[in-house]
Amino acid sequence: MKFVILALASLCTLMQTNWELKKEKDGIKVYLANSDETNMKQFKVETFVKANPRKIADAVVDLENNYKWFLDVEQAELLKQIGKNEFVFKQVIQMPFPFKNREVIEYCKVTELPNGVVRIDLKEDNTFIPESKDYVRMPISRGYWILTPAGAGTDIEYSFLADPGGSIPAWIANQFIVSNPLKTIKNLREYLKT
């Protein structure tokens, strides 16, 4: 039932029509949209990467190594393996001084479709474990990756909505909403070459 709700929520996200292109660089397009749930902007990235969808998906869900390319991820830890392609994990996100690092508890489902598309759905699960006094728990952290085979590689659509919680003003957090996804995708491209 949980995945059905997650899939419906993701479908609603896909149907949004208010995306505004904010930056295009090195074949990467970053769009922003307003959210009804928070003052934070939601981003969407579209790009092409010379790797197959499965290889990209494996890099995204590789909790031991995705800190090597995923911007500001300090550490990640598997909390529960629910099925072969379904799990709950924790990430610690580095924040600039003087802000406290953030903790994300995320439910993840990877779906391989018959047409070769791989979809990764992510949704916060803030009741899974108690909050840590060492971090600020992010109240909203949800999104998706859609990895579509295209010629010698993959078309990527990656969208995410995050509210860092705590005392960070939305106007400060929104300053990084274009540059951070851009850097993350560039890092992913380099990582996939190794």
Image: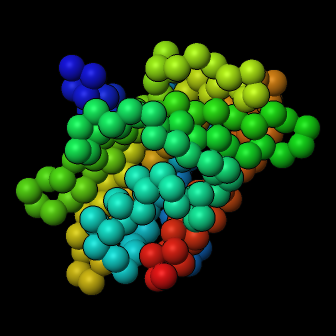
Q: Which image quarter is the N terminus in?
A: top left
Q: Position of residue 72 (x, y in %)?
A: 68, 52
Colouring method of the image? rainbow
Quadrant housing residue 71: bottom right
In-front residue for pair 97/153? 97
Give the residue at x 37% y 80%. 50
Q: Is residue 2 left or right of residue 183?
A: left
Q: Is residue 161 visible?
A: no
Who is closer to the viewer here, 17 or 45?
45
Q: Position of residue 96 (x, y in %)?
A: 84, 46
In the picture shown, does residue 188 fall above or below 174? below
> In the orientation shown, which residue stands out farthest toward the left?
114
The percent position of residue 131, horizontal first and vertical second, equals 63, 19
Determine which quarter of the picture holds residue 180: bottom right
Residue 30: percent from the left, percent from the top?
Answer: 54, 58
Question: At 27% across and 22% down in the image, what residue appears?
Answer: 2
Left or right position of 172 against 182: right
Judged from this view, the residue extending furthest toward the right is 98
Q: Is residue 46 visible?
A: yes
Q: Nearer the viewer, residue 127 or 171?
A: 127
143 is higher (above) or lower (below) than 22: above
User: Could you say which is closer to the camera, residue 84 or residue 5?
Assistant: 84
Tell whether 104 sits left or right of 189: right
Q: Residue at x 72, y 50 (%)?
A: 176
Q: Residue at x 33, y 47 (%)?
A: 120
